[in-house]
Amino acid sequence: MISRVWHGWTEPIMRFDNLDAVRVFAGEDYEACVVPPAARAILSRFDQRSAHYEVMVEM
């Protein structure tokens, strides 16, 4: 499982089964943050790049 983490006011975590699933969601440049236009309109800032972590053990 791969988690995608954004840092900011809130830190939503998106979980994907594998890196290919991340690419389907985010595109080939999977480290570029995916921020919908409606969210961009109300956010004062957001990270341009995201970090991905492999979850070894889920509690």
Image: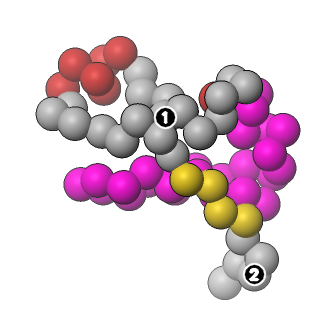
The magenta segment is 1-25
Q: Residue at x 22, y 19 (%)?
A: 41
Q: Can you tell which quarter of the image residue 46 is in?
A: top left
Residue 51 locus on image (x, y percent): 55, 53
Point out the residue furthest to the top here.
37
Q: Residues within 10 Å of mark 1 (few under 14, many from 20)?
A: some
From the viewer's perspective, is residue 13 above or below residue 27? below
Residue 33 locus on image (x, y percent): 49, 34
Residue 3: say if magenta: yes
**Residue at mark 1:** 33
Q: Do the residues labelled 1 and 2 touch (CB within 8 Å)?
A: no
Asked which secondary structure carries label 1, the reply is: loop
**Residue at mark 2:** 57
Distance, label 1 to label 2, CA atoms, is: 25 Å
From the viewer's perspective, is residue 49 above or below residue 16? above
Given this view, does label 1 or label 2 mark the residue nearer the observer?
Answer: 1
Q: Which of the marked residues, 1 or 2, is nearer the chain's N terminus?
A: 1
Asked which secondary structure carries label 2, the reply is: loop
From the viewer's perspective, is residue 52 above or below residue 54? above
Q: How crowded is mark 2: few (under 14 residues within 10 Å), some or many (20 or more)?
A: few
Residue type at the position of mark 2: Val
Q: In screen coordinates, is 4 left or right of 35?
A: right
Residue 16 locus on image (x, y percent): 73, 49
Q: Residue at x 62, y 55 (%)?
A: 52
Residue 7 appears in the rendering: yes
Residue 38 locus on image (x, y percent): 31, 18
Tell me the quadrant of the picture where the N terminus can be found.
bottom right
Residue 25 appears in the rendering: no
- Residue nearer the viewer, 58 or 45: 45
Q: Can you tell which quarter of the image residue 32 is in?
A: top right
- Residue nearer the viewer, 45 or 17: 45
Q: Residue at x 66, y 84 (%)?
A: 59
